[in-house]
Image (tube, rainbow, N blue to C red):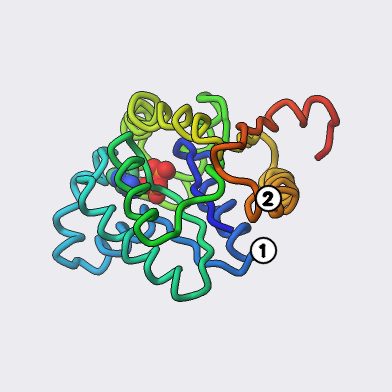
């Protein structure tokens, strides 16, 4: 199973990425984590990207694309699955990632979009700020990261819908319920992923299911 997580800050990419990785026993590649790790270790790369992170700006595309390329190469050797959280964050990254993965015969099977209302995202990020002290979790920077998501990242969701690999999930609910719905959907899709060509598929929208059935 090869999954890309597309979601705004605070939607739960990291949490759901870890749940998916554990369930399918595949590597979890989180670019934000990798970058923060470089900053903490004060590597050359870390020093180069620190200001971008602190201001809530995207780091240059080449930096993350190099990181993710290596991660995809490693994932191929480790068995072929992955869950990537944090890339792509704009259209140029989406196209470049597709080319990188195609060359390695490792294109994503599913682009998983976590949908959360903006007020809820601000609430969650401010709550996290009180606990974790991430340098980009101040109110001004949070609002800027949400704007970057809205203008640069969100438009790529339609591109994945056109490619037929989009699955949208309502992530307003508690993390374990969101996780359960994601795993149910991914398990149901396994045969599709293995046997149905990408171009013959249609986007899957599960965001109305919570309201329809109550407790999925
Ligand atoms: P969040 O989604 O909450 O902002 P992440 O941990 O995914 O958290 O990312 C934190 C920061 O890392 C981003 O604000 C950005 O500066 C940088 N970053 C992560 N992934 C990318 C990417 N693909 N392209 C550019 N910058 C990135």
Q: Are marks 1 and 2 in contact (CB under 8 Å)?
A: yes
Q: Nearer the viewer, residue 81 or 137?
A: 81
Q: Is there any visible trace of residue 211 in the rendered image?
A: yes
Looking at the rendered image, the quarter that the C terminus falls into is: top right
Q: Residue at x 66, y 30 (%)?
A: 205
Residue on which the image places disc 1: 23
Instruction: Find the distance from the CA under tag 1 to the CA under tag 2.
Output: 10 Å
Residue 176 in sight from this viewpoint:
no
Q: Residues within 10 Å of mark 1 (few under 14, many from 20)?
A: few
Which disc number belongs to residue 53?
Answer: none
Q: Quadrant of residue 17?
A: bottom right
| Residue 143 picture location, percent across and down | 37, 28
Side of 179 relative to 134 (left or right): right
Residue at left offset 62%, top offset 58%: 19
Instruction: Say the numbered circle drawn on residue 186.
Output: 2
Left or right relative to 114: residue 35: left
Residue occupying image coordinates x 30% and y 57%: 35
């Amino acid at each position: 199973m090869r999954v890309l997580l597309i979601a705004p800050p605070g939607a739960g990419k990291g949490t759901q990425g870890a749940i998916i990785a554990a369930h399918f026993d595949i590597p979890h590649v989180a670019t934000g984590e990798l970058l923060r790790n470089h900053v903490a270790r004060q590597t050359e790369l870390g020093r180069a990207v620190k200001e971008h992170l602190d201001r809530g700006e995207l780091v240059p595309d080449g930096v993350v694309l190099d990181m993710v390329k290596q991660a995809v190469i490693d994932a191929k050797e480790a068995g072929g699955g992955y869950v990537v959280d944090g890339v792509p964050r704009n259209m140029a990254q989406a196209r470049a990632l597709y080319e990188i993965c195609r060359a390695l015969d490792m294109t994503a099977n599913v682009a998983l979009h976590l949908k959360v209302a903006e007020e809820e995202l601000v609430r969650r990020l401010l709550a996290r700020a009180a606990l974790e002290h991430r340098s980009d979790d101040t109110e001004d920077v949070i609002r800027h990261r949400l704007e970057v998501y809205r203008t640069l990242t969100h438009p790529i969701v339609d591109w994945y819908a056109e490619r037929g690999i989009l699955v949208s999930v309502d992530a307003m609910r508690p993390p374990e319920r969101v996780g359960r719905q994601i795993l149910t959907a991914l398990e149901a899709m396994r045969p599709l992923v293995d046997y149905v060509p990408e171009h013959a598929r249609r986007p899957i929208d599960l965001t109305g299911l919570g309201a329809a059935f109550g407790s999925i």
